[in-house]
Amino acid sequence: MCSIIVSVQMTILLFFAVKVAKLFELSVDEFYLLYNLLSDLFASINPYLLWIFSDSLRKYVLVQLGLRTNSSLTNTAVHTKTVFVTEKS
């Protein structure tokens, strides 16, 4: 998860470094299109990665959306019944 976040940050850093070094020319519209794309990716990647890598959060959200039954509420214990037999004399 950390490596994905760092790679997104490095992509943004590389984008600005190449832009400042003037290795390629972009129109204002193209620059802001790429800037907004990278900015949105950077801002929204953390919750999606948390959703992907966290089992407990994913199960909780699926239960809340009604797409999965809550297995922790389902009782799987074995019920036994004890019968006492008394003799008649």
Image (spheres, rainbow, N blue to C red):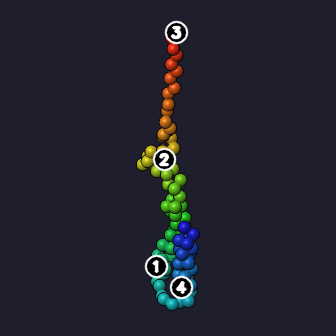
Q: Are marks 3 and 2 in contact (CB under 8 Å)?
A: no
Foreground residue among 31 and 60 = 60
Instruction: Give the residue type that dot 2 points to.
Output: Gln
Q: Position of residue 34 (x, y in %)?
A: 48, 77
Point out the image quarter for the N terminus: bottom right
Q: Earlier in the sequence, mark 1 or mark 4?
A: 4
Foreground mark, 1 or 3?
3
Q: Residue at x 51, y 44 (%)?
A: 72
Residue 84 in view, yes or no: yes
Secondary structure type for disc 3: loop
Q: Residue at x 51, y 59 (%)?
A: 51
Q: Are marks 3 and 4 in contact (CB under 8 Å)?
A: no
Q: Is residue 79 above or below residue 4?
A: above
Residue indicated by mark 1:
29
Instruction: Give the residue type that dot 4 points to.
Output: Lys
Foreground mark, 2 or 4?
2
What's the mark number on residue 89?
Answer: 3
Q: Are marks 2 and 4 in contact (CB under 8 Å)?
A: no
Instruction: Give the residue type that dot 3 points to.
Output: Ser
Foreground residue among 76 and 42 = 76
Foreground mark, 3 or 2?
3
Instruction: Give the residue type that dot 1 points to.
Output: Asp
Q: Residue at x 48, y 45 (%)?
A: 71
| Residue at the extreme front of the image, as rendered | 89
Residue indicated by mark 4:
19
Badge 4 crowding class, 10 Å Cα cut-off, few under 14, some 14 to 19, many 20 or more, is some
What's the mark number on residue 67?
Answer: none
